[in-house]
Image: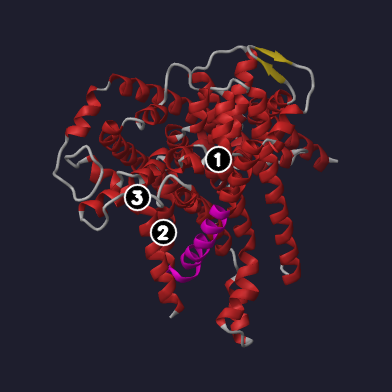
Amino acid sequence: MMKRLQLDSDARRGLSQISLPFAFSVLLLAAPLTILLAMSFWTQDFLTLDRTFTLANFKEAWTSPVYRTLMLRSLKISIIVTVLTVGLAYPAAYYMSFVAPNNRKALLVFLITIPFWTSYLMRIFLWKVILGFNGVVNGSLMGLGIIDAPLDWISYNQFAVVLTLSHAWLPFAVLPIFVVMEKVNRSYLEAAQDLGDTPFQRFLRITLPLSMPGVVAATLIVFIPTIGDYVTPRLVGGPDGLMIANMIEIQFKNANNAPLGAALALSALVLVSSVAGIFVWLNRRYLKAEGAA
Amino acid sequence: MSKRILTMFMIIFVIFLYAPTLLLPIFAFNDSSIIAFPLSGFTFDWFKSLGAADELRKAAGTSLIIATSSSIIATMLALLATSATVRYKFPGKGAMIGTIMLPMFLPEIIIGVSLLTVVLLAGLKLSIYTIIMGHVLICTPFCIAILRSSFQQLDPSLEEASLDLGESRATTFRRVTLPLIMPSVISSLLIGFTISLDEFVIAFFLSGTEPTLPVYIWSQLRFPQRIPSVMALGTLLLILSVVLLTLSELLRRRSARRLGQTSTSGAL
């Protein structure tokens, strides 16, 4: 009896404390997302908004070749960027957790975190400075007389977008993997060694399955936001490297067709969430097969 | 053997991570309006040119107001949310904290356009307030991530002692809890400030007539002759971010030490 009363007053206190930040999120995130959803079913008629329900925007977003090309290209770029960043981040996180001496770990984490927080816009822009027609690479190579004309394959294309985005998101992928690796119980590894496993077997049977939750977190943190990147395609993508976010901006601003923009934004979100969902499901099956889950 | 390969990999990894950033100060001091090697000479002109740009000063002012307000509001919301989730069990906890943390996993453009839609439909004007709202939304999850560990390490018996001695909850928070977690609170304020100061996409969608610093920089990127000045500005921003982050990290470590000490002395 006493205990239940206590719990109830605790629950009340917790609810009253979280109510303000939760209300803020509902008001400024959940409600606007709902309104965005409503908007995607309406039609823009020059300056007025026709609020009769229609699926025309979604039909256009999914069937018109322009939008479909942009959507699939964005998805393809996000997948490549995610595979690259997570693939490169994994050995880095492994080094930080298993190879680096303990007194160096904090410094390494800090070294990885700094670029994480320093001006996103400038970091992307620097790649334009490096890869552009008059950029560091071309300017320097031409200045040294190694090439006569700027290399055109290094910039204003999808390669430049993938390179730039991968660089921008690398730190975001390292930290979640590192955090999970730090929790791997080292005595399992010793036990496996005592029982005669080779280092590679130990890695495959213990470290990899146990660090998978970090890989999943890193994948989601990189994959989902990347599909909506606006700055990189605009700066280094050229016409061939534009992504869906650039079209969303055009619909909202220049084309003055917010409903179509809303449908494109939500379609991209649904697409990326479904792919992420499939990945999480596959990972669960892998962990079950490994007996780690 | 494999250790040596991994160490080599890590060195290359860190160099790759930092290499582009190092170009910023190099070309900010380079005496040429063309960004290419070989360098032509040393100059402070690009930094001097920043002092003369009125629009830049205005944008910096706007960003300062937005970053300060967003970091304060986000930290207060994060304090409430963290205190509630770390200490109490209540129905709907997972869903509520999930909603609050969601902006961490959403593309920023989705947050930008959904807030823009509301502003458009409500017939409101885009202003610094709309940007502050967007920034509070994206800063709060990071502030919660920072505050969470210090709330988890906080010894509840200290607060209980204060309550038993007849202090009110508000006084206990002000005189016991807050001083103990102060370093993480400041660290959370600094991180919130840095995120808001750097954020571009939401500000780009939600700014009206007053651009923020990143939106101003974006408008300058179109003009090749302004690039060296942008590099100078970027250098200053980089230094500011590094200073703020280092401060934040030092405070976070101090907080961990302080809480660690109180809990061991509590155990003794």
Residue tagged 3: B20
Three-letter amino acid code at the position of disc 3: Pro
Task: Report the side of B14 relative to B173 (left or right).
Answer: left
Q: Secondary structure at mark 1?
A: loop
Q: Quadrant of the C terminus of chain A?
A: bottom right
Label 2 or label 1, whichever lies nearer to me, is: 1
Q: Say which of marks 3 and 1 sits in front.
A: 1
Chain part drawn in magenta: A80-101
Taking the view exactly as shown, the residue that stands out farthest to the bottom is A196
| Separation of marks 2 and 3 at Cα, in angstroms | 19 Å
Do tags 2 and 1 sit on the same chain? yes
**Residue A30: image x %, image y %?**
69, 30
Which residue occupies the foreground of this view, A110 or B19?
B19
| Dot 2 amino acid type | Leu
Work out whether disc 2 and disc 3 sit on a shared chain.
Answer: no
For the residues bearing labels 3 and 1, Cβ distance under 8 angstroms: no
Write down the residue under mark 2: A108
